[in-house]
Image (tube, rainbow, N blue to C red):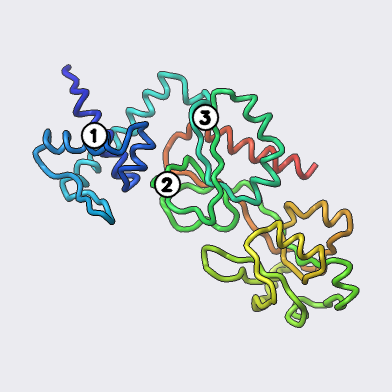
Amino acid sequence: MTFDGQLFSGITVLAAVAESRSFTRAADALGLSPSGVSKAMKRLEQRMGVRLIERTTRSLKLTDDGQRLYDEVGTHLVGIEDAAARASGSKDSVRGRLRVNVDPFFSRIALAPSLAGFLNRYPDLSLELIMRDDVGDLVADGFDLAIRFGQPPVGSFVGRRLDETRVLTVASPGYIEAHGRPEHPYDVDRHQRILFYNAGAARAFEWQFCRADEVLEVRPAGHLLVSDVGTMLGACVAGAGIAQVLELGAEDLLRSGQLIELFPDWPDERFPLYALYPSRQHLPAKVRTFIDFCVANLVARRQ
C-alpha cells in the first residue's frame, strides 16, 4: 500500500482549521506557526486542484468543496487518532497538555488547595486552568473540557453532572440587627440586596425560593450588583445586604456565624455543577482523571 504522507498532513491541517475557524488557533493545536498552516493549506489546494478555504480579514470558512472533504475524512481522522492513542498507551496514561475552561469560584475553593498533589501524581501532565465567563465553543477555543455551574447551554458537547449545591439566602448578624430579619421570602423585596451578575444573560440572576413543589420568584432588585463571588460574600459579611449564595464555599462562614441562613424551611433550590466535553466516544485518560479529581475534591469538602 502506498502512503502519501504529504496529503495526510494537509488534510490534518484542514481538519484543525475547520474545527477552530482560525489559522492561529489551528497552529496552536498542531504546534505549528500560522504561516506554516497557511502554506500547508495552499499546498493541499494545489494538490486537490480546488479552493478549500475562503479567508477574509474578518472571517474564515470552508468552501463547499472544503466542507465536503472535511465531512468525509473527519470520522476517519478520529479513528486514526484513537488507534494511535491505543497503540501508544495514552488512553491509559495521563500525559500532555490539558486545557480546562473552569469556573473561577470553583477553581479557587475546590481545586487550588489540591493542585500541587495532583500535579505531583502526574508529572507528565501540563495543566492549564483558564477562567472564562461562559462555556463558549470548546473545540474552537482549544479546550479539552469545561467545569461550569448551571444548566449546560445548547451546544455540541456532552454534559456530566458532577454535583449540585444548595442556594442559600443569607445575611450577617450585623445586617439583621440593623434592618431586621425577613420572615418570609417575599419580604426580601423590602430589604437591601446584593445581586450576582449572570454573564450569559447580561443581567442579574433571578431569585427563587423552593420548598418541595412550591416555587416562589422575587424580582432581582438591589443596590449592589457584583460579578465576583468573593466580593459578594465579603460584602454580605460586612452587612451590605442580603445575598443568595451557594452553600459550596460558604460553609465556613455559616459555621462560624458570620452569615446566617434566613429561610432554612425553604431548602430545595439547587444549582448544578457540570463537566462539559466534546462529543467523542472515548475520553482521554487525562480528561477522565481530571474529572475524577474534581469529584474527589467535592466529596472531601463534605467530610
Amino acid tagged 2: Asp
Residue 140 position within the rendered picture, expressed as x and y whole percent measured from the top left: 38, 47
Tell me which amino acid carries mark 1: Ile
Can you tell which of label 1 and label 3 is closer to the viewer?
1
Task: Kindly identify which residue carries mark 3.
Answer: 285
Residue of label 1: 11
The quadrant the C terminus occupies is: top right
The kind of residue tagged 3 is: Ala
- Left or right: 216, with 125 as reference point: right
* Labels 3 & 2 near each other (Cβ < 8 A): no
The residue tagged with tag 2: helix, strand or loop?
loop
**Secondary structure under badge 3?**
helix
Which residue is labeled 2 in the image?
141
Q: CA distance from mark 3 to mark 2?
A: 21 Å
Q: Name the residue furthest top.
A: 1
Q: Quadrant of the N terminus?
A: top left
Which is nearer the N-term, disc 1 or disc 2?
1
At label 1, counting other C-alpha atoms closer than 10 Å, the crowd grade (few under 14, some 14-19, many 20 or more) is many
Q: Does 9 sit above or below residue 225?
A: above
Q: Determine which quarter of the picture holds residue 83.
A: top left
Seen at 33% across and 32% down, the residue is 32
